[in-house]
Amino acid sequence: MSYTTDKRVAGEFDAVVEQTIDALSDEGFGVLCDIDVQATFTEKLDEEFRQYRILGACNPRLAYQGLEAEIELGALLPCNVIVYKEADETIVVSAVDPTQLVGITDNPDLDSISADVSARLERVLESL
């Protein structure tokens, strides 16, 4: 069972990150946090790691609807989108599959919300 949807993208890493942020914005998502994993591992562990960013994306309207239906949903938010460089220099953009994530709540009131979020994230990946 896959819990992400991925797309391989050609280009310069930072440019792909910016394109991803712009595409998320076009779908109504803001990026609440941007974690540079490579820099964090270098600073905290003195370890080298590939370029890897975690973008915590949130669509406020959909988050509000989700939290109204399931107050504990906040433990699963925001929706993470990752951008990383593979060994062959290919850039991968990967988004969490909201239907898999929300499926653990066993709350059918979230089905339409997770389907909406999933469709939006798929459009983000398609646009890259």
Image: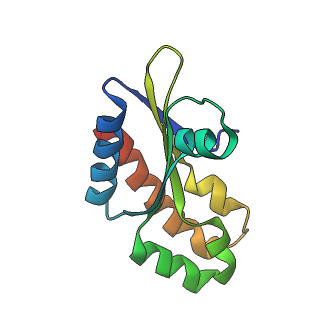
Please provide percent x and percent y for residue 85. Answer: 48, 27
State the quadrant of the N terminus. Answer: top right
Question: Which of 100 and 50 lies nearest the eye of the viewer?
Answer: 50
Residue shown at 34% from the left, 54% from the top? 24
Taking the image as shown, residue 19 lies to the left or right of residue 98, namely left
- Estimate the x, y position of residue 97 in percent, counting from the top left: 57, 50
Up-down relation of residue 39 to residue 55 (above or below): above
* Image point (58%, 71%), residue name: 110
Asked whether 36 or 73 is in front, the reply is 36
Considering every residue shown, the one lying at the far top of the view is 88
Q: How many marks?
A: 0
Q: Quadrant of the image for the C terminus?
A: top left
- Which residue is nearer to you in this view: 73 or 109? 73
Q: Residue 13 at what x, y percent from top left?
A: 37, 32
Rendered image quadrant of residue 11: top left
Give residue 88's position: percent from left, percent from top: 49, 13
Residue at image position (60%, 44%) is 43
Q: Is residue 103 left or right of residue 36?
A: right
Residue at 47% x, 54% y: name it: 118
Q: How is the image coloured?
A: rainbow
Position of 10 relative to 122 (above/below): above
